[in-house]
Image: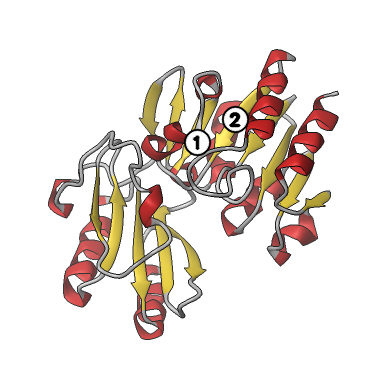
Amino acid sequence: MIFVFDLDGTICFDGKQIPLNIQHALEQLMQKDHQLIFASARPIRDLLPLLNPKLQQAMLIGGNGAITQVNKQITAQQPISSVAFTQIKQWIEEFDLDYLADDLWDYSKRLRQPHSIEHKIDPAKLAQNRPLSAIQHPIKTILLNLTQTQFLFLKQQLTHLEVNLIEHSEENGRFNLDITAKHINKYYTLTTYIGQAKYVAFGNDMNDIELLQHADYSVCVGDFAPLRKLANTHLFANPADIAQKIKQLIG
């Protein structure tokens, strides 16, 4: 069977490492010849530091489907179009926005207000923070710390471009817009590799809806209501319970 796991909020709760009991359960999954796939909003660069050497052998889907690593080979599935990215860069300059733009490996970042994403960006110092103009293959761009006025305006304007949007709200009342190429999401990219094969999926938030919606069996971790409604099983963010569920499913 194919098992697909989101990372942050699903099997990783501090943004730095997967609890050891979950790591051991995932390694058992691989030992029993099941296929393991990780599917995250993080780019490959920021996925790797979360995984031990054994788990790094799995297929990786990063950037909410925009980039993959298979057999150590990194591939951009579909970058944001040059037309769309040019317009996004103009808005960043015009409104003086905080942002994160990911290339295949390097990135461009501006964060002048505190944000929960900051400690997840290149934690192992594997890449470089380059000028926005140096990003050649924009797999994903996040507009960060938006006011409500900026958020509503940009959300409406972005509907006219060939992009896919995922919106998030922060506890401080600010908003984020995750931007990838049109139609790109974790499930779409997964199907380019496994076709219509059955799979088990674990997820926790908006980024995982399509992934769990099409799974043969799905597990929602946490309290995101839209995901709980469609999942077969709900678990609290308790590493012991999650590890036990993985072991139960692999037999």
249 and 197: which one is in front?
Answer: 249
149 and 195: which one is in front?
Answer: 149
Q: Is residue 82 left or right of residue 17?
A: left
Element at label 2: strand
Q: Residues within 10 Å of mark 1 (few under 14, many from 20)?
A: many
- Looking at the image, residue 94 lies above or below residue 79: below
Q: Residue extending furthest bottom?
A: 149
| Count of numbered labels shown in the rendering | 2
Quadrant in which the C terminus appears: top right
Residue at 28% across, 42% down? 103
> Disc 2 versus disc 1: distance between alpha carbons?
7 Å
Give the residue at mark 1: 61
> Where residue 88 sits in the image (x, y, percent)?
26, 63
Residue at 65% across, 35% down? 4
- Looking at the image, residue 118 lies above or below residue 154: above
211 and 126: which one is in front?
Answer: 126
> Where residue 138 sits in the image (x, y, percent)?
29, 47
Amino acid type indicated by mark 1: Ile
Amino acid type indicated by mark 2: Ile
Residue at 20% across, 40% down? 128
The quadrant holding residue 154 is: bottom left
Give the residue at mark 2: 37
